[in-house]
Amino acid sequence: MVFLGVDVGSSGSKCVAFNESGQRLAMRYEEYQTAAGALNLPPELLIKTVFSVISGCVSDIESKKDIAAITVSSFGESFVPLSKSGKPLTEIIMYFADKARAELDLVIDAVGFEEIMSVTRTMPDTMYALPKMMWTEKNVNEPVWKYLSIANYVMYVLTGEAVTDYTLACRTLLFDLQQLSWSDKLLNVSGIEKSQMPQVVPSGTVVGKVLPGVAVALGLSSGVSVITGAQDQVVNALGAGVLSEGECVDGIGTVECITPMFNSIPSLEFTKRNYVCIPYFNGFVTYAFTFSGGSLVKWFKDNLAGNLSSEAIKRGRSVYDLLNAGCPKEPSGIYLIPHFQGAGGTPDMVKNARGLMYGLTMNSDIFDIYRAVLEGVTYEMAYNLETLSCFGVSPNRIVASGGGARSSQWLQIKADIFGREIIPVAEEECGALGSAMLAATVLGCCSNETEAVELFVRHRPSVYPNTQHMSEYKEMYEEYKKLREIGLSLA
């Protein structure tokens, strides 16, 4: 069998094909043709891009009849409102659009801030779907038949079925985590009807078969199953092999996100620090993240390392290669607070926070500052790990995935600052791999998720802490926290 893992992102979509042994057979990726940072995404462009990467991936597979399933995962929060005929009624409002504040306040006033958190185990914010759904209700010309998250909309186009999974339902601010159902209280207050929401099922559920006409358009044989994936960070955790309490994946992408697994729902104080609770097999996961992860490294490369561009071209290498080659082997002694996009992640939500740098001398050069950038992002994630431990969430096995996991320098810095072994995954497309593993399990190639991990997941050699650096970083981390507090106090 061949499984297609579709990962719908906020800037582009990809499709990756894996066989029953977890071997990657093909991959296609396309960015959406929209302006950078656009607050809206046309649904027709989304589907055009998704269909393009699926059909492209299918064309690269020798035996197309072996394709058994498509599993669709995506980013959360955003949605497509559909008419009864299945027509999108608006463009997709992206999750980072700070919109519908009045609608959110209405729900908070009616239900109470803490009660919303108690039901959803999510801190209310305009990034979630509910307030934007309420705004949509007042601004469309036709009644909304269904509100579908991004992956669910793609599955609807593929099958004609309106279904969501627990992980994406959690990103609406309408889902009762303990009851695993839509919250009647929040629906009543918001004016959204339960009938407007899709059926909720676990990740790894067969939704239906690809519609005949769609199968022809994609180059597929008849009878290909469509399976619910999950929010992107969840399938990334599965693709990294995270299945037990005490394990986590550190996804080092544009946004850096640590996703740890734990067995029971923590106290409400956990939620007040902006940590969500998401169902995950026999337990839960949360997201500890900073927006200024790989995006900050790219900012540094684009704005402060431009002098390396000509040298990189001359040597046939990337600027990142030259930065990593010149990166000092010792701690930089420079403190960088990475709140360049505000402290908009976890555990603090201070959107007006700004980045800080302290410790520069006349001897500091571009490579010292580069190392300080890698250290600063890692300090911020160490602060998240420290905060999580206060609630009994203490991962001791850290698997690394994403583009940043290709940097041996960054992985060593992480091992030294975290004081833990870092285990990089071999498959770079971890999220798509996790999606394929769901399909392999539900279609019987693997008896359970544990067997799927044993069959599909491979790791590169571990990176261990340098004991001398670990000791130095332990002292420097305490200074980092002081500077972090000063930065937040100025916001």
Image (cartoon, rainbow, N blue to C red):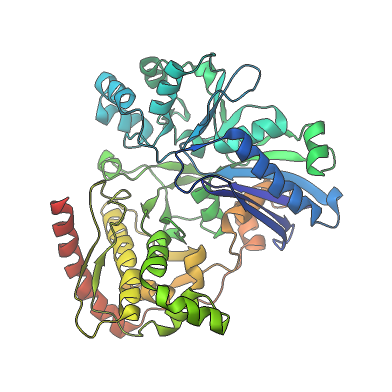
Q: Is residue 402 left or right of residue 185?
A: right
Observer able to see residue 297: yes
Residue 37, how many percent across, how many down?
A: 44, 46
Observer able to see residue 418: no
Q: How many marks?
A: 0
Image quadrant where residue 220 sits: top right
Residue 414, how many percent across, how many down?
A: 37, 71
Judging depth in this view, the residue of 415 and 289 nearest the camera is 289
Q: Is residue 308 left or right of residue 61?
A: left
Residue 245, how many percent across, how many down?
A: 43, 55
Is residue 129 positioned above or below 460 on the image? above
Is residue 476 positioned above or below 165 on the image? below
Image quadrant where residue 248 sits: bottom left
Q: Is residue 155 left or right of residue 170?
A: right
Residue 103, how many percent across, how many down?
A: 33, 23
The residue at 53%/54% (across/down) is: 236
Q: Is residue 132 left or right of residue 144?
A: left
The residue at 79%/57% (across/down) is: 60
The residue at 78%/51% (across/down) is: 58
